[in-house]
């Protein structure tokens, strides 16, 4: 009896089956693609920001607030970085929203501030740490201490005399005239400078930044604003600020002591009429 030959269907129909070669059977990605590397945070990156600010409003009152964020290394500005000559101004182009404080995403424990004889705990407030304080805690020309209880991202730390506070700032005169906006303020120090920001609440990309001698009085010509900012309501903010870097992991942190004064300002589309002073 002749044995049966069991032939593969592919031998019977040579054109019906693909050959076991070619891309059909090959791994399209034999080596996994490496995940993209995190961007270099840059040489000016920081890992934390701690701020103690006294804010005063024309026609209102003063308040004191402490704010902190401890975050992965990154570069950011808390106010304009554009260069402006002393007693000069520069118009901005970037969105003022870019000056917001980064979210606090590092676990360094709980921050405490030593103000006077008290140790005050900051509490987690959404994306950052914060605490509203009585104005009695503000002492100008002082250096306050900060403590971190420590966590997985940083052991417990004690930073002595790391938060400086500048002289208290209030506006004594805020007068609009044909020449411009005349401002006088308290606590003048000829060796320092005042930073001024005229910004829009409705469009954060509209602002003018100035640097003034801290000599107690300055007139801001309308030419610095008219034609640069559209007609409308703006916030005028002046501030004194001191800052200090402190060790925080691979990159430093920064503290800022700020005394600020704000007022509302209306910018017209045309220059003032010098005949009536309005």
Image (cartoon, rainbow, N blue to C red):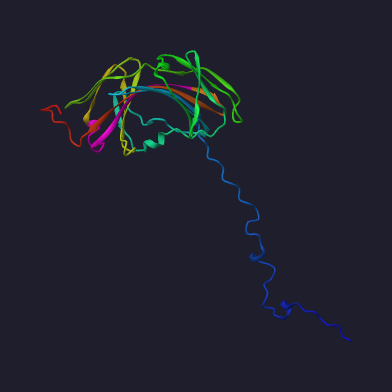
Q: Quadrant of residue 13?
A: bottom right
For the point 81% across and 81% down, the residue is 5
- Quarter of the view holding residue 258: top left
Residue 240 part of the magenta segment: yes
Image quadrant of residue 203? top left
* Residue 242 horizontal/vertical position (percent): 42, 20
Image side of residue 135 versus residue 218, left or right: right
Q: Which residues are magenta?
A: 223-244
At 65% from the left and 59% from the top, the residue drawn is 27
Q: Position of residue 233 (x, y in %)?
A: 26, 34
Q: Measuring from the top left, give residue 164's x and y in whole percent.
A: 44, 18
Q: Is any part of residue 58 visible from this angle?
A: no
**Quadrant location of the N terminus in the rendered image:** bottom right
Q: How many marks?
A: 0
* Residue at the outermost right position: 1
Q: Is residue 88 in the magenta section?
A: no
Outermost left residue: 275
Reply above or below: 14 against 69: below
Left or right, 237 with respect to 30, comes to left
Residue at 66%, 62% (x, y): give it. Answer: 26
Q: Do we see residue 225 in this rendering?
A: yes
Residue at horizontal 67 percent and vertical 77 percent from the top: 16
- Residue 250, image x, y percentages: 57, 29
Residue situated in front as seen by the camera: 204 or 149: 149
Looking at this view, name the residue that lies furthest to the bottom.
1
Say which of 28 and 161 sits in front: 161
Quadrant where the C terminus sits is top left
């Amino acid at each position: 009896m002749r044995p049966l030959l069991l032939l593969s269907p592919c031998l019977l129909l040579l054109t019906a089956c693909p050959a076991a070669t070619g891309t059909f059977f090959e791994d399209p990605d034999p080596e996994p693609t490496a995940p993209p590397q995190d961007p270099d945070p840059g040489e000016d990156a920081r890992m934390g920001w701690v701020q103690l600010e006294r804010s005063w409003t024309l026609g209102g009152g003063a308040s004191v607030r402490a704010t902190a964020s401890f975050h992965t290394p990154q570069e950011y500005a808390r106010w304009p970085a554009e260069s402006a000559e002393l007693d000069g101004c520069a118009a901005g182009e970037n969105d003022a929203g870019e000056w917001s404080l980064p979210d606090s995403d590092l676990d360094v424990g709980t921050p405490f501030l030593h103000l006077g004889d008290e140790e005050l705990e900051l509490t987690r407030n959404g994306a950052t740490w914060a605490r509203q304080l009585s104005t009695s805690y503000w002492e100008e020309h002082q250096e306050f201490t900060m403590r971190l209880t420590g966590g997985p991202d940083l052991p417990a730390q004690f930073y002595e005399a790391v938060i400086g506070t500048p002289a208290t700032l209030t506006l004594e005169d805020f007068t609009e005239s044909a020449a411009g906006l005349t401002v006088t303020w308290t606590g003048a120090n000829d060796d320092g400078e005042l930073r001024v920001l005229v910004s829009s609440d409705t469009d954060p990309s509209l602002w003018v930044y100035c640097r003034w001698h801290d000599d107690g009085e300055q007139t801001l010509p309308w030419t610095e604003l008219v034609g640069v900012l559209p007609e409308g309501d703006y916030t005028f903010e002046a501030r004194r600020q001191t800052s200090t870097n402190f060790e925080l992991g691979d990159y430093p942190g920064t503290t800022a002591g700020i005394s600020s004064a704000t007022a509302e300002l209306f910018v017209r589309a045309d220059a003032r009429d010098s005949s009536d002073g309005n």
